[in-house]
Image (spheres, rainbow, N blue to C red):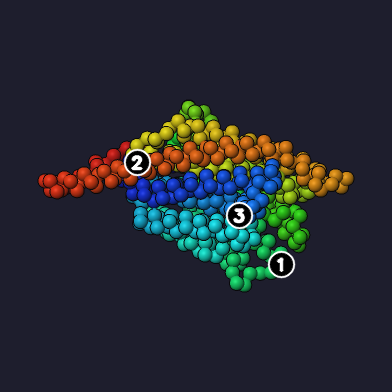
């Protein structure tokens, strides 16, 4: 159960302390989300019209798709999650954000790192390791920005007035440690002057991919969902014991997954990965039970509000995780490896799970932090339906097409070109879903951009007014009174 904020604490003071850092993190994240989806759409168009970007080397599938994937993860998911974490830590701590200038500097370091990394990939300078394509310079900036934000979050937690820990604390604090450990370790081994040779590089990269897309995303987004679901549903988080059990089992079993059955490595590695994947069903089912008990019987009207985003995201996590686990089953991996099925599962994790939960949290946080309603509330509701419909239309054809493609590839009588072409008709449907998700991302970007612009104009107007008043009669600026609302 999450705590009810003490009525003696000024919630508006907490929100104001988070305003500038969150605008820096959310604004950049929304922009990278739009660019990442646009690049992904450009990449897949090469399958519909192969010569469309024949004269643009930076828009070839290998470069554009790698840049698009990294923008979805490093550009959007991680900075957006960090911004939500800061706000949650401040609210649960019942104290203003500690060192508020630090995350602003960190956000700019992070966005510059993403810019350098994306430009390097599009220019052909990728490291060649999936999900770790950014060069060393970009990786250093990302790590430095993350550590600065982590220090701010831990400092805020250290100054908390309420010393009790809650499920959100477990997941979010573990997420801070998990990224720092996994990202630093993978870069130390792979993006260095003395990288290991041979298949060891692939093993390290598979380990990092699993830790980022399965373990870290789960820790960060589930921790966020476990804070907001009880608040929005108007009831305590159900089964805290199940939540603790799922947290421990996810951390223990989830990290062993990642080695595909077809990997040219010693047989014990894929075997351990397959057993770990099977055991990872336990935390996934436990998290599904907690989610169902929390949202069941809720009287919250769901017409595209934050509750809809977060609930959809949690059910997407259950579905995407089960499909991800199935990829490591020897019986299914023989058919599913090297097909569009893997792409569909990954996109469901990034868009259906992470993007939905983070977008819902952003729409819930921004009006509180800015002290005003969203400029385009109807677009925010439209955003949910575009994201939900677009994600399903995006990933389900890829899953079906991947299975059909895998069966064709397993048939020796079917030529490779014909087997690969089996998925093209499903890919055309999937492209429509990508376009819908892109339109939803534009709704998010427009709301954040306009709200930020309004705030800056209001700040400028206030400064001009204070200067005029001080020149006329020397009156001092009086701050707004503290709003001691109890609702988080």
Q: Which residue is mark 2?
A: 454
**Disc on the earlier residue, 2 or 3:** 3
Which residue ends up furthest to the left in the rendered image? 473
The residue at the point 63 percent across, 55 percent down is 57
The residue at the point 67 percent across, 36 percent down is 429
Q: Which mark is residue 414?
A: none
Residue 43 placement (x, y as % from top left): 63, 47
Q: Do we see residue 219 in this rendering?
A: no
**Disc on the earlier residue, 1 or 3:** 3
Q: Which mark is residue 58?
A: 3
Q: Do we see residue 67 in this rendering?
A: yes
Q: Quadrant of residue 326?
A: top right
Q: Horizontal placement of 466 versus 59: left or right?
A: left
**Disc on the earlier residue, 1 or 2:** 1
Residue 282 placement (x, y as % from top left): 64, 45
Q: Which residue is mark 1?
A: 198
Q: Horizontal placement of 162 versus 469: left or right?
A: right
Numbered disc in front, either 1 or 2: 2
As rendered, which of 301 and 131 lies closer to the eye? 131
Residue 262 placement (x, y as % from top left): 76, 55
Q: Few, some or many C-alpha atoms within 10 Å of disc 1 (few <14, some 14-19, many ≥20)?
A: few
Question: Residues under labels 1 and 2: Cα distance?
Answer: 54 Å
Element type at mark 2: helix
State yes or no: discs 1 and 3 in contact (Cβ < 8 Å): no
The residue at the point 77 percent across, 41 percent down is 422
Element type at mark 3: helix
Q: Few, some or many C-alpha atoms within 10 Å of disc 2 (few <14, some 14-19, many ≥20)?
A: some
Q: Horizontal placement of 407 versus 235: left or right?
A: right
The residue at the point 62 percent across, 36 percent down is 432
As rendered, which of 298 and 404 lies closer to the eye? 404
Which residue ends up furthest to the bottom in the rendered image? 194
Residue 400 placement (x, y as % from top left): 72, 38
């Amino acid at each position: 159960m999450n705590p009810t904020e003490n009525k003696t604490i000024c919630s508006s003071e907490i929100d104001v302390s988070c305003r500038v850092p969150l605008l820096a993190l959310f604004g950049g994240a929304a922009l990278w989300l739009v660019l990442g989806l646009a690049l992904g759409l450009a990449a897949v168009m090469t399958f519909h019209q192969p010569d469309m970007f024949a004269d643009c080397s930076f828009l070839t599938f290998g470069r554009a798709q790698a840049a698009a994937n990294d923008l979805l993860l490093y550009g959007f998911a991680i900075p957006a999650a960090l911004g939500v974490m800061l706000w949650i830590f401040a609210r649960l701590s019942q104290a203003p954000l500690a060192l508020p200038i630090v995350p602003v500097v960190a956000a700019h370091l992070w966005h510059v790192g993403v810019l350098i990394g994306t430009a390097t990939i599009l220019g052909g300078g990728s490291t060649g390791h999936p999900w770790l394509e950014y060069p060393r310079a970009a990786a250093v900036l990302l790590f430095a920005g993350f550590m600065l934000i982590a220090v701010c979050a831990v400092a805020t937690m250290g100054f908390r007035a309420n010393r009790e820990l809650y499920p959100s604390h477990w997941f979010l604090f573990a997420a801070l440690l998990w990224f720092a450990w996994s990202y630093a370790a993978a870069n130390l081994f792979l993006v260095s002057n003395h990288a290991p040779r041979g298949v060891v590089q692939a093993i390290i990269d598979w380990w990092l991919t699993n830790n980022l897309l399965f373990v870290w995303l789960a820790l960060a987004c589930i921790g966020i969902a476990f804070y907001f679901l009880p608040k929005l549903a108007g009831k305590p988080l159900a089964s805290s014991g199940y939540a603790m059990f799922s947290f421990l089992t996810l951390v223990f079993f989830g990290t062993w997954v990642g080695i595909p059955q077809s990997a040219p490595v010693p047989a014990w590695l894929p075997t351990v990965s397959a057993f770990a994947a099977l055991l990872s069903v336990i935390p996934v089912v436990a998290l599904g039970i907690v989610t169902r008990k929390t949202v069941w019987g809720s009287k919250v009207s769901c017409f595209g509000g934050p509750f809809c985003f977060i609930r959809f995201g949690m059910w997407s996590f259950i579905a995407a995780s089960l499909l991800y686990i199935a990829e490591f089953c020897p019986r299914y991996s023989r058919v599913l490896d090297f097909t569009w099925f893997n792409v569909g599962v990954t996109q469901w994790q990034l868009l259906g799970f992470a993007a939905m939960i983070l977008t819902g949290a952003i729409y819930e946080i921004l009006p509180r932090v800015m002290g005003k309603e969203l400029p385009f509330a109807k677009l925010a509701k439209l955003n949910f339906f575009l994201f939900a419909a677009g994600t399903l239309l995006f990933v389900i054809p890829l899953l079906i097409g991947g299975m059909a493609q895998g069966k064709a590839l397993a048939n020796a009588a079917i030529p490779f070109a014909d087997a690969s072409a089996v998925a093209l008709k499903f890919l055309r449907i999937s492209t429509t879903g990508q376009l819908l998700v892109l339109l939803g991302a534009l709704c998010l970007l427009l709301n954040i951009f306009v709200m930020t612009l309004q705030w800056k104009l209001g700040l400028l107007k206030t400064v001009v007014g204070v200067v005029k008043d001080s020149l006329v009669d020397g009156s001092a600026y009086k701050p707004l009174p503290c709003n001691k609302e109890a609702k988080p």
